[in-house]
Image: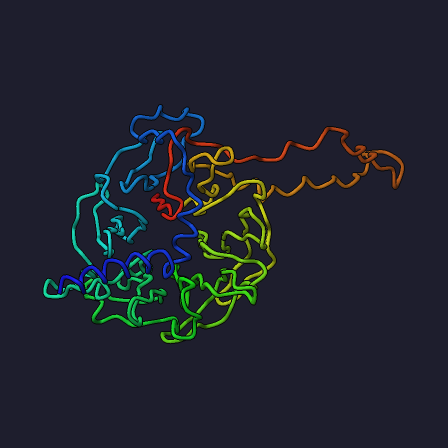
Amino acid sequence: MIARFLLGVFLAAVMLVVGVSSYLYLDARQSKVAVAPVKPTAAQPTPRAFHLPGTLYLSQSGALYSFSAGRFHQLTIEDGWMQPSLTPDGNLLVVHRQGFYSDVFELNPFGRPMRQLTNNVAPRRSYDTGDNHWSFYPRITSDGKTVFMSYDKPKTGYEVDMSIWSMPLTGSIARGQVWSDEAADPGYTGGDIQPVPVPGGIVYTRYDRNPDGSIIGQLWFTNRPGSFGKALTSPGEDCREPSLSPAGNYLAMICTHGKQISYLVIAPYSPGNLGPRQAVITDQMVAQPTWAPDGSGIAYLAPAIPDDPFQLFFLPSQAYFPPAPSPIPTPSVIPGGPKGTAVPSPSPSSAPAPPPVKPIQMTTSLGFDATSPIAWAP
């Protein structure tokens, strides 16, 4: 029994290094610096001019924090809490990650556990860590009834490639359904992660291999269990981390195009279809884009300078939805003048174009988890 247990520990370590490759790819994007990041609660409040609407929920070093009115509040201890998302009634779905498994919990807005949705630790009688399971990236449907997540079942032995599962909020994973066909994935890519409920189905990231063996991401849409559905992006775009706009008509995503940088890209979205791409940030290593509930912009994580920890940034909507130019006035007839006499149209203005709208850096010296999405409540 002891030998089996030790073998299980070793294989679980191998599983984490190889099996959840897409997860560790994101984790590798977090800076490894000698100076520890400052705790958010110790940071100075942001200037009033830069306050964001509503409340943001973020993860740093395994603790959850809320951010509102320019101040941070710590909600949990540093114990593997991560990947918050919102329920329709304002609670949080979060992941609690342990050494060899992870579970999904529902917390209230102040960080108090209300229920445990999964129980992924192996039974006490088992010495085999391969009997553990992993759940990541929980998201709930708008009616509050169904939870989607990345889950490592089915699997063969210690091979961990995630599938997209659904389960009832008030039930258990035993009543769950598998939505993405993980069995069709090549092994050890990471599988399918980060589902986002959308009208008529879900959008998720599927990891696959290029002919050269490198791992790439694609966004896929499916409207029924047991099927990949259809690809929304091409392998060459290498996209991941989808985020649906409040109106449901745009997707934000991260794409690399095979380069050592991550672009923030937005595109019009209709059920099962993605329109022309617009790269709105091309000079930062962007992670986890999240739309403001009021549509005023997109929050995301990125290093302020290369090799620094990930900070919170905000890109105002004027950067990607610029206001329409003022119409040129039409000539008007001079009252009492000769027939057909018109006031000359004003000559085009020689004023310079307004400067481009740039992202606003909301934090400094912090270090948020790049693998943990941001939740943003009104």
Looking at this view, name the residue that lies furthest to the left.
Answer: 125
Between 261 and 330, the residue placed more toward the observer is 261
**Residue 252 in picture, x, y percent from top left:** 49, 52
**Residue 170 in picture, x, y percent from top left:** 19, 63
**Would you identify the image quadrant in which residue 335 lies?**
top right
Between 281 and 155, the residue placed more toward the observer is 155
**Would you identify the image quadrant in which residue 300 lies?**
top left
**Would you identify the image quadrant in which residue 3 lies?**
bottom left
Q: Residue at x 24, y 43 (%)?
A: 109
Any part of residue 67 in sight: yes
Quadrant holding the N terminus: bottom left
Residue 293 to residue 22: above or below: above
**Residue 340 in picture, x, y percent from top left:** 88, 41
Any part of residue 290 in sight: no
Q: Residue at x 27, y 58 (%)?
A: 10
Quadrant holding the C terminus: top left
Question: Relative to 173, is 183 on the left or the right?
Answer: right
Looking at this view, name the residue that lies furthest to the right.
Answer: 338
Looking at this view, name the residue that lies furthest to the front.
Answer: 3
Q: Residue at x 45, y 26 (%)?
A: 49
